[in-house]
Amino acid sequence: MRLAYTEEEEEFRARLRTWLADVLPTLPPRPDPLDWQARRTYDMDWQRRLYDAGYAGLHWPKDAGGQGATPTQHLIFLEETEAAGAPYVGAGFVGLLHAGPTIAAEGSPRQRARWLPPILRGEEVWCQGFSEPDAGSDLARLRTRAVRDGDTYVVTGSKIWTSHAEVADWCELLVRTDPEAPRHHGITWLALPMDTPGVTVRPLRTLAGSHEFAEVFLDEVRVPVDNRVGAENDGWRVTMVTLSFERGTAFVGEVVACRRTLRLLARRARHNGRWDDAAVRRRLGRLNAEFSALWRLIQWNVSEAAHGLRQGGTGVPGAGGSVFKLRYSQARQELYDAAAAVLGPAALDLAEEWALERLSSLSYTIAAGTSQIQHNIVAERILGLPKGR
Amino acid sequence: MDFRLTEDQRALRDGMRQLLRARFDREALRDTVDGAAVGSGAAAVDGAAVGGDAAGTALDSGLWRELGQAGLFALRAPQSAGGVGLGLPEAVLLFEEAGRALLPGPLVASHLAGSAGLVAGAEDGTAVVTAVEGTGPYGGPTPPVEHLAAADAVLVLDEGHTVRVLSPGELAARPMRSLDPLTPLHRVHGRRESDSPGARAAGGSGREQAVGAGVLLREAVLLTAALQLGSACRTLEMAVGYARQREQFGRPVGAFQAVQHLCAGMLVRSETARSVVYAAAVTVDEEEISAAKLLADTAAVGNARDCLQVHGGVGFTWEADVHLHLKRAWLRAEQWRTAVTSEERLASALLCPI
């Protein structure tokens, strides 16, 4: 049980800190969160700076143009960038965290050469076309059809919860190519250029009032067969290669941010008198324990993933991450509920700090697998309970 | 950073698990419970004073010495002093196993005394040591003292003071009717005259030790958290085992999502607690130790309750072991830093500059 970082890891951290201290003051002002084009420009500018400094695709394998960093270095990177107030991955999310790694693992040499460098250089934005109105937690139920016509697929259907669709160049799209096959076996992975005729994007307004995702409608959209990654009808496996393994580093930055918020919250409570209420103090004290534990759980999972990689594996099975996600999503909601308790009636003012985050925290127990699905995964895959009903 | 058990740590933990399986299996546990049920009942009836036969379960002194020989008490004493020379992380792993097995006895106090060389004989298990916990800066009542009748010495740990060692006869204490059948408890009222014959017979106790109580208190809190963690893991296993095998409506109850989700929630509690308990053993940071105890208490109590629920009617019987875990967990939650104290400490820490 070693929590201390190695000399090499500390050097990596020191170099990163120096670079961040130099680069952050030179960034343009933050864009208006409602202006998607401005957000794209800002996020891609940041990605380009990462690329030039040798931090792009940190966790990608070297032969895919990445840095081949260890999970621990990735953890340090996410911790330090958050602590320094650096921009978040933003519009680069899908390209860097899912589509890119999928192409790196399953794409042909030509596909890798075409799609990976622009992701790393911050030139092309990807979005994800997985969920559908009738295929949420039960993703394998997806019905968007692709019919082969010579060297193209003709795709018709609709996708939902697609982040950054308005500004994306590409969409990693799951389509059904064989409606007769068992549900997991008739699915294919395609790269769809978002400017193809027949693609319509309609922004979805969230309960927080902003447009964080969109619906994507596909009406006889023609996608070249060359844009298929993996074999026809093998798309489920292709997708899961990246989805079912992780390095334990999801949410690192967010946990760092939550711990900072907690300290600010305590100060605010001290300032506005709520600190005198023992119930408020105890609530914040318990959250301090929860987030300390979540931080240690990240370090535990990252160490496991690093060990797995050293042994030649691909990382930790996603089931281990389910434990973390279950606790974190809940704790994040508890944090912003506690913030509301500290703010009192001011929490009703959306101009107040934390009021909007309280609203967006509501998505955490739903997005990327609801807590109920996560419980099922834990029960069946970790605890070995019989398949549920 | 490599936050995982080393091979040696794994081997140490497995060794302890084997030892306990051989020497304190379920049958031994239930025999102890049956023996204790008579003893504690008698204590409640005649309210006997310290040292009386009826003050509760006698510890199995043979087992205690075996634990001593296995190094449980001298684990952290330096090898030059005849100890094992290991650290808190290793101690935490052994205490987790003790918690799993519901091993009775004043393990924490005896380990502290044995590893710090405070009481002769503690290190090899020939002396049994219990402890009295001071109220600390956040006040509240003094928790009861466990296994007083079986103890040869009592550590007094009060924050901000040096450690004192008393003989059990020096405490003015009355037996309680202990909630936990395997942990006899006394309520402490104060100290008797130090020149009483009982005190002198025990060998000049009451002496101050050069050791500050703060360090030992922290360790006591952490090791208690480890016991709680072990219990939480055990009740999870019990719940899962039962849910797999018990059938209703033509299928194992563990196939019902309502039951699955209870079990999954138990794993989330125990794994969250584990990460911070292990980390606190490495950092020995005051704030992190509070977090460890708080979350381990939550896991032990919460998991025992959910385990009971998963067992249905069987869980409410004396025959099932679930209640033993729950009762011990409730007791440990009252010992060595309660939730109120931990939460207040953790809240204050938020205001400190980093």
Image (cartoon, helix red, strand yellow):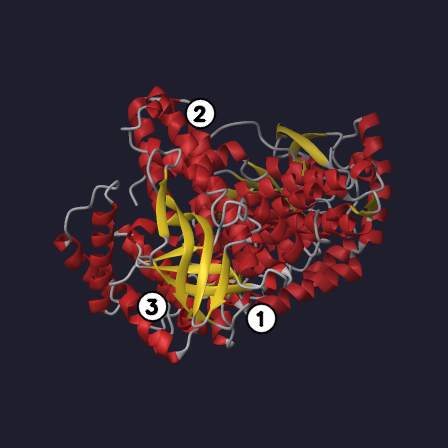
**Who's the residue at 80% across and 49% down the image?**
B29
Label 1 SS: helix
Secondary structure of the residue carrying tag 2 is: helix
| CA–CA distance in space, label 3 to label 1 | 24 Å
Hey, what amino acid is under mark 1? Asp
The answer to whether B257 is drawn above or below residue A89 in the figure is: above
Q: CA distance from mark 3 to mark 2?
A: 41 Å
Tag nearer the camera, 1 or 2: 2
Q: Nearer the viewer, mark 3 or mark 2?
A: 3
Q: Amino acid at mark 3?
A: Glu
Which comes before the other along the chain, label 3 or label 2?
3
Q: Are marks 3 and 2 in contact (CB under 8 Å)?
A: no
The residue beneath circle 1 is: B8
Measuring from the top left, give residue B205's x and y in whole percent.
60, 43
Identify residue for label 2: A278
Quadrant of the frame with the C terminus of chain B: top left
Amino acid at dot 2: Ala
Mark in front: 3 vs 1 = 3
Q: Residue furthest left?
A: A26
Q: Is residue B19 left or right of residue A331?
A: right
The reply to whether discs 1 and 2 touch (Cβ–Cβ < 8 Å) is no
Q: Farthest top residue?
A: A345
Question: Any mark on residue A199, and which?
Answer: none
* Residue A75 is at least partly visible in this image: no
Nearer-the-camera pick, A216 or B163: A216
- Residue that carries the numbered disc 3 in the rendered image: A9
Judged left or right of residue B289, residue B20 is right
